[in-house]
Image (cartoon, rainbow, N blue to C red):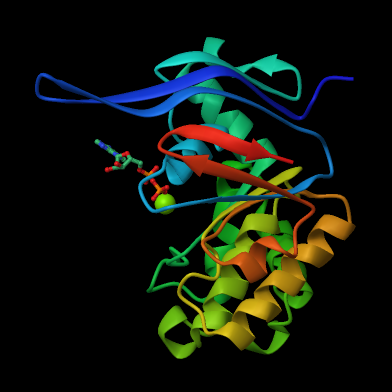
Amino acid sequence: MASMISLKDITKTYHLGTIDVPVLKRINLSIEEGEYVAIMGASGSGKSTLMNIIGCLDRPSSGQYFLAGQDLTKLDDDELADIRNQYIGFVFQQFNLLPKLTSLSNVMLPMIYADVDKSQRIEQATAALVQVGLSDRLQNSPNQLSGGQQQRVAIARALVNHPALVLADEPTGALDSTTSKEIMNLLTELNQKGTTIVVVTHDASVAARTKRTIRMVDGVIVESK
Ligand SMILES: Nc1ncnc2c1ncn2[C@@H]1O[C@H](COP(=O)(O)OP(=O)(O)O)[C@@H](O)[C@H]1O
Ligand SMILES: [Mg+2]
């Protein structure tokens, strides 16, 4: 059976004026369905660049990326956006919620692109917010919520289309240690229900919760076990 994620000789090079900045150098990596993976490495080692490529938010400079057996490097931008909406949920360090919208409306957003009608959007978004323990905060805007609650809303938004893959880039980086644990409990629960999760973290206690740790140094994977 094909791996869920298969990266073959992926490179990413930025061009600043006449200078080439190689950020990912021939990355080879496979992640199977149901895995729970941490990516660790110093700041600047290329973790977010790799996550953005895995998440179809960015394209590699060279190499091949297969997601569920499909060669994504052959797809155009619209097709890539469809794959992203269908397969992938994102959680970011800074939550990235829209400040003027309620929790419910923030969580309903991804379904607009998925062409779901409004009553079903409300129903699914409410269920996702209940799942993350925020049934009593549906109508609050982000500035009325704590950091941990905002990250729960962001996780509900990531889950609402039932993605097979959740990517979290430093999801606990802006949270205190108690709140971090709660957020990691949610991700662990989600993985136990079958969702594949990749989490970038600086925090060894976060990585200890996953089943596999990948270490990056200077655009290269140095350890993958
Ligand atoms: N758009 C960009 N243009 C030029 N350089 C970039 C760009 N994005 C990231 N970089 C560089 O790529 C390297 C890796 O960045 P990043 O993937 O964000 O690392 P990490 O997430 O591990 O901290 C850094 O040196 C960063 O400065
Ligand atoms: Mg980063």
Q: Is residue 11 above or below residue 165?
A: above
Whether residue 36 is visible: yes
Residue 13 in percent (x, y) is at 32, 23
Give the quarter of the image for residue 149: bottom right
Residue 140 in percent (x, y) is at 52, 85
Figure quadrant of the C terminus:
top right
Give the quarter of the image for residue 133: bottom right
Left or right: 181 with respect to 189? left
Whether residue 56 is visible: no
| Residue drawn at x 45%, y 75% as measured from the top left | 174
| Residue drawn at x 55%, y 10% as measured from the top left | 74
- For the residue pair 93 and 133, the one nearer the viewer reads as 93
Q: Is residue 63 above or below residue 214?
A: above
Q: Residue furthest left?
A: 17
Q: Residue furthest top?
A: 74
Q: Is residue 51 above or below residue 61?
A: below
Residue 220 in percent (x, y) is at 49, 32
Figure quadrant of the N terminus:
top right
Q: Residue furthest front?
A: 222
Please tell me how many numbered marks the rendered image carries.
0
Left or right: 85 with respect to 19? right
Give the quarter of the image for residue 69: top right
| Residue drawn at x 64%, y 42% as measured from the top left | 88
Residue 34 in percent (x, y) is at 84, 44
- For the residue pair 129 and 93, the one nearer the viewer reads as 93
